[in-house]
């Protein structure tokens, strides 16, 4: 019993330290970008020495990947909560697509994180093959309810994948316009445009002859 309690305390202390490091890293990444950040700067912001930081993370890319994994887990949870309340496939599709959009609309810094904007702009760079594979799988898992609902409406799997990409791309474009303030130029709402797009896709699916 004493050993279990000590193990629990050690785990809690470790989790607390990792949380402090991740909080500090987010602030450093927001100001310096991923390319400009350093483990030394992150360690200083967290109140640790660089050597102590290595006990938890072996690189700044590993820290960034951990932050992004947590963000994607929250995204997946938001989509799952939204679809759990919907029964009809069309309702699940609408709920999943709009939950994806709203998550990033409500958490713009997670949008920066997910699109690697902390790197100082959009660049075709990753965080290493192992991290990229895990993160890509997590993103696809979070978006899977969109494709599943589309198939439930009668679409083929390849058609469902295409619609998933279309929804992702449309949401990303609107979110970036809203996030950068460009949407004000057009005097319209990103949310309303997203809803119109999703409703149009659902209507087209519903009107398509069933196989």
Image (tube, grey):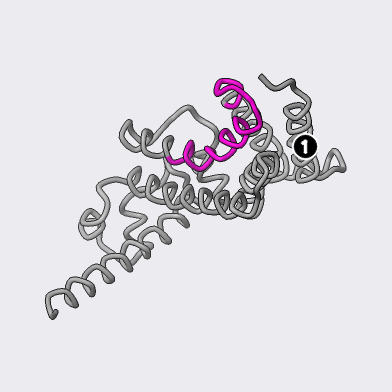
Which residue is found at the position 23% from the left and 72% from the top?
8
Q: Is residue 18 above or below residue 211?
A: below
Q: Nearer the viewer, residue 89 or 4?
A: 89
Instruction: Judge whether 194 appears above or below 165 on screen.
Output: below
Q: Is residue 17 left or right of residue 149?
A: left
> Which quarter shows the C terminus?
top right
Please name the residue that numbered disc 1 is placed on. Answer: 199
The total of numbered circles placed on residues is 1
> Helix, strand or loop at disc 1?
helix
Q: Residue at x 19, y 77 (%)?
A: 5
Q: Main secondary structure of the magenta part?
A: helix
Q: Quadrant of residue 59?
A: top left
Query: What residue span does the magenta drawing correspond to?
Result: 138-160
Q: Position of residue 23 (x, y in %)?
A: 43, 61
Q: Can you say whether 150 is above or below 31 in the image? A: above
Q: Is residue 20 magenta?
A: no
Could you say which is closer to the camera, residue 132 or residue 201? 201
Residue under the image location 64 percent in, 48 percent down: 99
Horizontally, residue 169 falls left or right of residue 126, namely right
Is 149 part of what is drawn in magenta?
yes
């Amino acid at each position: 019993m004493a050993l279990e309690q000590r193990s629990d305390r050690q785990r809690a202390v470790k989790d607390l330290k990792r949380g402090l490091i991740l909080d500090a890293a987010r602030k450093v990444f927001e100001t310096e970008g991923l390319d400009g950040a350093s483990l030394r700067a992150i360690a200083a912001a967290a109140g640790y020495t660089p050597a102590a930081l290595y006990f938890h993370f072996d690189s700044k890319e590993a820290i960034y990947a951990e932050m992004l994994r947590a963000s994607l887990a929250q995204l997946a949870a938001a989509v799952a909560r939204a679809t759990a309340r919907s029964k009809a496939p069309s309702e699940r599709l609408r709920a999943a697509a709009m939950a994806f959009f709203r998550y990033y609309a409500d958490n713009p810094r997670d949008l920066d994180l997910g699109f690697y904007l902390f790197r100082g702009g959009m660049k075709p760079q990753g965080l290493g093959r192992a991290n990229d594979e895990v993160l890509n799988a997590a993103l696809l898992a979070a978006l899977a309810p969109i494709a599943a609902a589309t198939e439930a409406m009668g679409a083929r799997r390849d058609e469902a994948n295409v619609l998933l990409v279309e929804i992702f791309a449309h949401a990303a474009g609107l979110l970036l316009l809203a996030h950068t303030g460009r949407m004000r130029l057009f005097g319209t709402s990103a949310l309303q445009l997203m809803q119109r797009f999703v409703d149009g896709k659902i209507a087209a699916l519903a009107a398509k002859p069933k196989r």
